[in-house]
Amino acid sequence: MSELLYVGKRIPRSDGAKKATGRAIYINDLKRPGMLYGAILYSQHPHAIIKSIDLSRAKALPGVRAVITADDVPDIPIGFIKDNRPLKKGKVRSMRDEIAAVAAIDPDIAAEALTLIDVEYEPLPAVFTPEEALAEGAPLIHEKDAKGRPLSDNKLKLPWKLVCGDVEEGKARSKYVVEHEFRTTFVSHCCLGTSGVVAEFDPDKNLTMYSITQIPYLAQGDYLEALKALGLGRSKVRVLCQTIGGGFGSKLDTHCYEFIAILLAYATGKPVKMQFSREEEFLAQATRQPTITTISHGCDVRGRLTFRQVKMLLDNGAYTSWGATTPSVMMVPVSSLYRVPNVLYEAEIAYTNNLYSQAFRGYGNPQATFAVESSMDQLAEAAGIDPVELRLINANQPGETTPQRFKITSCGLTECIEKVRDGLGWEQHQKDKAEGLSVSSHKARGMGMASLIHVGGGARVYRSDGHGMIMKLDDFGKLSVFTGAVEIGQGTESTIRQVVAESVGLPIADVNIVAHDTDICPWDVGTHASRQAFISCNAAIQCGAELKKKLFSLAGEQMKVAPDELDMREGQIFRKGSDDEPMPLLKVLKKAHFSTQGKMVMAETFYDPPNEMLDREMKGNLSCSWAFGCHGVEVEVDTQTGQVKVLNYQAAHDVGKALNPLFIEGQIYGAAVMGTGMALTEELKLDHGHVMNGRFTDYKLLTAKDKLPVTPIIVETDDPAGPYGAKGIGEPGCVPSSPAIANAIYDAIGVRISQLPMTPERVLKAIMEHEK
Amino acid sequence: MSELLYVGKRIPRSDGAKKATGRAIYINDLKRPGMLYGAILYSQHPHAIIKSIDLSRAKALPGVRAVITADDVPDIPIGFIKDNRPLKKGKVRSMRDEIAAVAAIDPDIAAEALTLIDVEYEPLPAVFTPEEALAEGAPLIHEKDAKGRPLSDNKLKLPWKLVCGDVEEGKARSKYVVEHEFRTTFVSHCCLGTSGVVAEFDPDKNLTMYSITQIPYLAQGDYLEALKALGLGRSKVRVLCQTIGGGFGSKLDTHCYEFIAILLAYATGKPVKMQFSREEEFLAQATRQPTITTISHGCDVRGRLTFRQVKMLLDNGAYTSWGATTPSVMMVPVSSLYRVPNVLYEAEIAYTNNLYSQAFRGYGNPQATFAVESSMDQLAEAAGIDPVELRLINANQPGETTPQRFKITSCGLTECIEKVRDGLGWEQHQKDKAEGLSVSSHKARGMGMASLIHVGGGARVYRSDGHGMIMKLDDFGKLSVFTGAVEIGQGTESTIRQVVAESVGLPIADVNIVAHDTDICPWDVGTHASRQAFISCNAAIQCGAELKKKLFSLAGEQMKVAPDELDMREGQIFRKGSDDEPMPLLKVLKKAHFSTQGKMVMAETFYDPPNEMLDREMKGNLSCSWAFGCHGVEVEVDTQTGQVKVLNYQAAHDVGKALNPLFIEGQIYGAAVMGTGMALTEELKLDHGHVMNGRFTDYKLLTAKDKLPVTPIIVETDDPAGPYGAKGIGEPGCVPSSPAIANAIYDAIGVRISQLPMTPERVLKAIMEHEK
């Protein structure tokens, strides 16, 4: 292959200038003619009967155009198992329950109208932990399932189980065994753009959603269901994604507020905007799935893993979004991070009167890896093996198939571990530690490490993992590329642009990405599972090949050369391996177009990766390629305050091929900060279901001022299935932060922190308990 | 063929509700964030040296963001022969000459700033008719041509000549010969939406034009030239057409105001809107080409035409837009309306200091047909043959090739003439006339008739007459159809939708037309020459066939039927000729998509009709099919006032096939009213180059209150090249109105009116002169 012109280069993103100069249109900026503003009244109780709702005062307020409750609208079951409704009827089950909604001519009037709605409640006993929820005699949160069948307890009928080999046999073979419980909590996505939507019906009752969803095509289906409920079965839905201020999985489901916007738009005949405040975003978006994980782990005398057994209990909150399906990814590191022959994974999920959770960068992997990798260090200690050594002994290798039937093709795990080890100065640290140099007065230093495995080549979690693409080359040599990919800040559009320029052979300025419109862009399952660059770029290469075939057939005729002898670079068509004068693309296009029975050059394709859905046993090659990585940190723990300071953060990732190192580093840096936030500071505190810290003054998000000293390390393994060898990297970077830091804290002070976040209070308390 | 479900049906237009409820976004409604408002300073003299322009006071006005003249911008030659500039330098040549432009934060400030610009002129002698312009010693309007070569007179170097057979030989064979001069004048398009545009650069200096052009793809090229002049050779142009409030050819060129918007947007870095007032629209849009036509005509003793000789002199105005090319269409009726063996057509065009003219519904055909068909009645009288009879004797017939080498395939001219004759009650009228019943006191009644020929199957006036199309079928059975067609009120999108629903076999509600965006929709040469339905629907049928091929290949696999045995109707796929249960489209799509290595159904195509460009001799089959028609009117002429009242208006058109009779009738009705306005009331009056009646209070446009009693008559001839047999019908309806009315006036009062419009003043004057 000749030298790459665009792929692998540090090319700034194409949406950068627009965003930096304030020219990008976020949902917050969007106004539609005649637009009304919606507002939602939430519950005042975590669990209560709604005895009555009096809307009369709200309706009488001048400027109010509609006030609705569940009584005014058809039944629209939503959510993963359809146990949720946009507006709640009869009873509330959490503090975020939507009871009524208003549309008014301005946001202040809408807010005032909410204060004029009088609701009478009859409070019910409530449960706020999965253990309470599953206890005998616990108050029942849902009386019936989606099909109307009575429920007798709060256990979600969605059990997850994976059995690989025989853990009992594995235990019997073990020389060393450890067991421990780990807990994670509510964490918010904290997208800088709060949730919002504008719903608009045209006079023919077709619906346009100006949206920020990560799943425009699946959302289209959800909205269509709502239209059917409204009796608009023939209506069409168009989803127009706006510039999105962060996704991180928060936009992988359709939300109550979106359906409420539809209902208000339908009621008023006007476009209706819903735009969350920051407080609303904390309350009524959704969170990471809180987990209680019991893990046990064994190895033989040589440190080879013998088994891994994991039991999880998840807090579902009051309704079921995609959070309830995160065990499908939690079991990935459990079964397949390091070579472990026998695996048993079980997860149970309980309804509570808490907020509900959903998809969040890593999709459960960070919670699971926190347990797996903390436990690995425990096992290393039990076995008297250096934790790095234990990881290297068991590291996955190319060509292996894991117990869950994942086919590891390319794998740079060993290299990642070694690079992190060296980047940290692990060996020197061990020496220093042996000499007692790692503790000075009340400040102790320690190092820790954790690895990760994640899907890196798509993930067939939905029946299609595919991506359609259309290309249209115009008379001026501009190539429009229609993609269903959603740009949520990760640089997808810029990456596709680079790959198209490279693979088609055009100057990058001539590649024009058209996205964010379901009417125009072919189907894509959504921006999730770190799949977007992998899938879209593979689609782009495939579509580009189709385009070039057509182009070279025209050019070949004009140049009197067989089409398959032609190639293009920077818009110049040339005969491969010859020094003949190349033919400019524009010349070929114009000649082909401006003649009798002229021709234009367009192409369309659908790329669907050859990966597999998990079978009934939860096995199968879910992804075409697997991403690996290793994070290592050095921390300083203040034993008087419990404060943990990260001194060095080495983040090595096997990315297959860095399509754009700038973007990869951005992904790694951002994810490591997010992972570290989850590790050290972030918790959405709920007290009896009430959000206690729903603002950025109280919710401790790491920001630029925290200057986390991350060194991104790119390991390239040239994945056979990836576009130019690339694998997904969107999520992995936030997976191993917590265990790496927990292991470093342990290394520093000998205290194992098993619960996130590892706040100063919690660390100090653990130190004091340890010293007892 | 099975019964048609959509084609031929009176289905209301898909944009109707939107337009009727005020939901359509016209350029007038459009606001972009940070948008500035532009305004143009026009000349105060029809011909003058610009001695100085002082911008200082205008620039000092608060709220003004830019004031520019030609001195501030690069040279951007525009127009058909590049003799025009967005802003004039050194000299003005007409009252519409753009001298300076302002961008300000609101339109009032922009208007005020114009009043603060001080221009010093040195007036020059000027010419206001082509005769004056071509006279010896006339002041020179352009000193140089586009290549800088000196010019010595005002004659446009664009002579038009067509020679078919030998007119001298024809004359010699003639038994009867007539000769006469006819004149037409300035007529305005009077689009209800005035001209406007928003030009916006993104931070990467790519340009988006929110436009109302009828030629988005050609305009793209023009704008690109402007960008090159600005040093932005790598920049891209996107044209986004807004809802258009009427076109009629006025938007077939790019205009000075559009380039001025670009220049102001570039100067300010902000989006800039230019929006004409009605007065500006009359002054600075463009008009129909005024003509002076000398025609002579002959026939043999049996009434068979022997020759036709036409000489035209056109007033070009001060700059050259597409008006200068209208002779290419004027020669169509001259050479090919009725069978005439020997034809000589010559046209000369002169620069004047008037406003310039351009494309206008019919593209010169109404002016030419006014002469041809008035003259036919003169010839009938000379030969003593009933005018209807003379037309029937000479009517074109299917299978003929005309002297200009037009291949007449389908032709319903005879039927049109007969239907109009019968609809008018021609024979009874002749009897009444013979009995003196057609005159009562000072009110005389008369009947007249005129036919037409026009391109009906595209027109290869540009090197491509093609149309690209993309189709994308989504999981919900919605078919997005990407078309470059521009909806200017004629119902093109609705027509394409019907044809797609019919030919693909979908419910019409599932067909979604995506248009008006050059980034997304493949190339189309523009909405001109009555080509849009013909070309776009042919493209739709071709693209639909491609789509069905792919769909039936998937369906065939699923249904175990050979794909070519399948067909679809209303979204149900069935085996042709069998009673088997059909397979719903949705089922096929979902099965194909939601499986490993899934498939989606998309298609793209480019349709370019098999018509020919005129050769150097101006011959060739310009259009794939030819439209014919005949209009007949009965008028009442008040001989005391000269007032002409239309009592009956029969308009028969050979449309090949009425894809939607509702739309056809709308086209015929609207065009007949437009043609009648041109005939009786419309004239943009220029006095020494100044517009004297640039408002609707003074410019007499016919409106709904005039209730013209038009009876549209649809004649179907099933054209072999047309989509479902259809031909174009956009322009023909305004072609024969003037001669039909002139002939009826003559029939009523025996006075030939040879100059348009036939106002009461002019009719009365003619009566008085006749009576002398």
Image (tube, coloured by chain):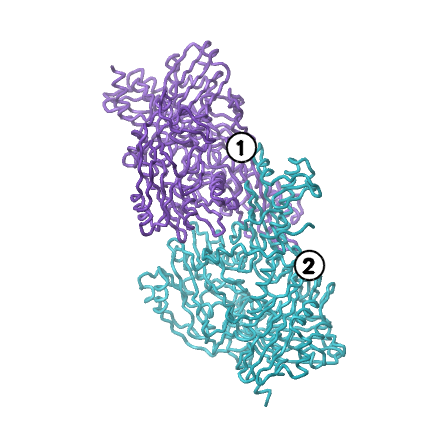
Chain colours: A cyan, B purple
Task: State whether residue A464 is above or below residue A116.
Answer: above
- Quadrant location of the C terminus of chain A? bottom right
Q: Nearer the viewer, residue A188 or B115?
A: B115
Q: Amino acid at mark 1?
A: Arg
Q: CA distance from mark 1 to mark 2?
A: 48 Å
- As displayed, is residue A58 above or below residue B158? below
Question: Badge 2 is on which residue?
Answer: A719
In the displayed orientation, state which residue is furthest to the bottom: A772
- Graded by Cα atoms within 10 Å as few (under 14), some (14 to 19) or many (20 or more), the crowding at tag 1 reads some
Where does residue B10 sit, x and y in percent of width and height?
Answer: 44, 39
Q: Tell me which chain the residue with mark 2 is part of.
A: A
Could you tell me residue B234's position as x and y percent? Answer: 53, 46
Residue shown at the point (49%, 14%) measured from the top left: B166
Q: Secondary structure at mark 2?
A: loop
Q: Position of residue A426 (x, y in %)?
A: 67, 75
Q: Secondary structure at mark 1?
A: loop
Tell me which chain the residue with mark 1 is part of.
Answer: B
Q: Is residue A387 left or right of residue B689?
A: right
Place residue B151 in its image quadrant. Answer: top left
> What label does residue B463 carry, if any?
1
Q: Position of residue B258 (x, y in %)?
A: 41, 41
Residue A713 left/right relative to B410: right
Q: Quadrant of residue B771?
A: top left
Query: Amino acid under label 2?
Result: Asp
